Image: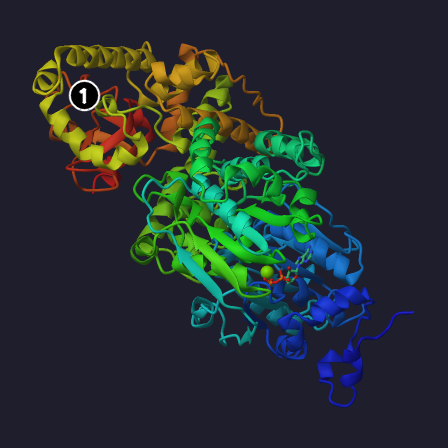
Amino acid sequence: AKTLPEKSQDANGSKPKKMAFYVPVSRDPEIQKARMELPICREEQLIMETINENPTVIICGETGSGKTTQVPQFLYEAGYGNPNSDNPGMIGITQPRRVAAVSMSKRVAYELGLTDEEVSYQIRYDTTTSPKTVIKFMTDGVLLRELSSDFLLSKYSVIIIDEAHERNLNTDILIGVVSRILRLRDELSQEQKGKIKPLKIIIMSATLRVSDFTENNTLFKIPPPVLKIEARQYEVNIHFSRRTAQYDYVTKAYKKVCQIHRKLPSGGILVFQTGQNEISTLCKKLRKRFPLTPPTKSRYSNELGQEEEMSLSETLEGIREKLTAKNADVEVEEVSIGDFDITESNDQDIEDEFDTFDSDLDEPSEKDEEDEDLPLYVLPLYSLLSTEVQLRVFQPPPQGTRLCVVATNVAETSLTIPGIKYVVDCGKVKERQYDVNTGVQSYTINWTSKASADQRAGRAGRTGPGHCYRLYSSAVFNDQFPQFTLPEILRMPIEGVVLQMKSMNIDIVANFPFPTPPDRVQLRRAEKLLQYLSALDDNGRITDLGKLMAQFPVQPRFSKMLIIGQQHGCLPYIITIVAALSVGDPFIREDNLDSSKDLEENDKETDEVEDKMREMEIDEQELAGIDNLDIAEKERRRLRRKKFYEVHMKHAGRDPSSDFLKLLNVVGAYEYAGATDKFCEENFVRAKTMYETHKLRGQITNIVQVNCPGANVYVDPKMGPPSSLQLKAIRQIITAGFIDQVAIRKGLLDKTANTYSSTRGIAYRIMLTDEDVYIHPSSVLYHQKPPDFVVYQELQRTSKVWMKGVFNEDRAELVVKDWKEFIC
Ligand code: ADP
Ligand code: MG
């Protein structure tokens, strides 16, 4: 027999009218006890009344106060999702992260004593939903995709949008869309009495910064009420690092964890890192340093060592496996080009540093370290880990050990790990970034915001006073950390968003109620580009091609290239070019040749230098000017430079008129040579970039496979060079993708003769700006007769505006309808 919890009793008499429906739940007494300690459970009555009386409610509460696990249960008990109630539709909860969607659904199922079908999850490649599902956790991308088949979200009676403070692109768009659906469902429910029910929206946030949702009158007619959940937060002592120079945060975190573990009282440690590779490296080192069962073959290395191996190779293999699974459902926003991890440091380096470090680790003497150290129970936490492994963080560590979780941002507000007393924060975050000028997206590692650093620190104060060790200085925090993270919509290319919206039949995107609207000019430009790409027709409606393109989680210009790339067996080449363009230029600049400094860090500085050097035409003369070098050194540099040119000309190929082909050639040669670092060194390309391109090719291949069933996408990593017919097709395909990035030689417009032998100083005109632009000296076209038309990949501004990644496309004229459009 099911027991009725107290609530129904104290509701006797003073019970609000709409709370009449009640679903009994029998919870494990232990769970019930733990729930009652959560701050949100004290507010159940208020929360449910507010939800019943308002179409939209915003709930703010400190991380760990119980929002994600409890609010769905309140709704469940109040009859939401119950076929006999007034709100028979499912309870839907969106999460920005897969890890959270999976683990939260499991937790809620467990607390309610229901099956994983009744409380299910759906993420990109995996789902437990069934017709029995009452509560469904999903990533925001999954719900966005559902909109294309069921715009009214008629299966749901309530949608909870969780982690709204993160201001993800998907979350923002969802909030805008559901605010519309709310009105539609309301109107329809009045018209068709009884058949369609109104929808409830609950927006949940870990911070109080919700004015973008409440003060935005295009979003909600009446500003939604904001419920603030008071949670006890214990004091957290913040310790800054003295210096931030030489920022190797993996090593720094290792040292800090060692110190905490060896010297400070018991309590879990939570370390924030930016990605899978750093996490794996750090976990490995910590496990080695503080093994679970000291002598050799520990249960640790059997159990967890294996899992670690798996996690490293899982990226590709796991995705591939899951993709071939039967019910693979692909989600638009989640895979994105460039979704791979960045290796920041190689193991050997770290090993070396650790040796020196261990010896200068403060007392006690080294001798007794081995015997006396308490074992450390080290667990990684990031989205690609299997669910079982992820869920371990919630279990108590083995007796006599201390818990240490090394996590990505997912532990910042999505998951609350019990028993954390110490937080070690690297202060960095991996973010998707977009260059407004070039449209190139990438993942970059940046300082996080002050708000998110404070959230991280707060994780140490859940169960008692704690400490947060920031691995950066207070000066860096004060001067370089932004107050808040910019909403993703302002950091992202909009053409993808626009296409996605059009595929949801939102024709006038400018009228869409964005929580933070994108820039209008950018919006218009995006629509124009989509028209050029034939994804939209002249009236701005989505075409069939556009619908297909919207299925690809990559930029529209790339999805177009991938779709039309299927002719003449060009797809493997196009996939390679798209991958390489997404990762970034692998070629080392020649003015970096003599420098041992980190090349990428130097890029910005060197641009100015590069311009100057190019104006002077660097050659032997320039070298001769460097006085303080001895003859041998000068000779060495001269030879190296000569080799550099030879290598570059080699990669440029038989018909050196395209930087894109040079890119294709170098990737081909790299794979042919066995993808070694030695190849990279000899060929003046960056090993890291090459490796990432290699990985991304595999990922894009999977994406194409899923979206174009039947396409012949088998990609032999060591593909042979393209035939001349294929070369021709490849050029056309790239031009089709970069159709708005065609430049015309200014002299052609002025009708001056083209007698030049080099493109140096030759002005071109383009659509994006009314300034003259020039072919960048790094282009293979720099030393050639200036073509009348070129296609370029990106613009870079230094002393002039340079076109980079250029190829000569005399047929560009054929694909451009009216040149006037292109010249401002
Ligand atoms: P919020 O969403 O407000 O941040 P949550 O609902 O995620 O809070 O968490 C409430 C509590 O439930 C936390 O103390 C958290 O540690 C606990 N919790 C969540 N998931 C699990 C789990 N899988 N196992 C054990 N405890 C969990
Ligand atoms: Mg939560």
Q: Is residue 24 left or right of residue 18?
A: right
Residue drawn where x is 57% and y is 39% of the image: 368
Decide if ligand 2 comes within 8 Å of the CB at mark 1: no
- Above or below, 373 relative to 66: above
Query: Regarding ligand 2, which quadrant of the image does it lie in?
Result: bottom right
The residue tagged with tag 1: helix, strand or loop?
A: loop
Q: Quadrant of residue 185?
A: bottom right
Residue nearer the viewer, 472 or 747: 472
Q: Quadrant of the C terminus?
A: top left
What's the residue type where badge 1 is placed?
Pro
Residue that mark 1 sits on: 786
Q: Is residue 71 left or right of residue 665?
A: right
Residue 405, placed above or below residue 621: below
746 versus 251 height, above or below: above
* Residue in the image at 44% along x and 72% along y: 217
Residue 823 showing in the rendered view: yes
Question: Is 508 rendered above or below residue 47?
Answer: above
| Residue at 69% over, 53% down | 396
The x, y position of residue 82, in whole percent, is: 78, 66
Residue 735 position in % (x across, y down):
36, 28
Q: Position of residue 549 (x, y in %)?
A: 50, 38
Q: Number of callouts in the render?
A: 1
Tell me residue 77's x, y (percent): 75, 70
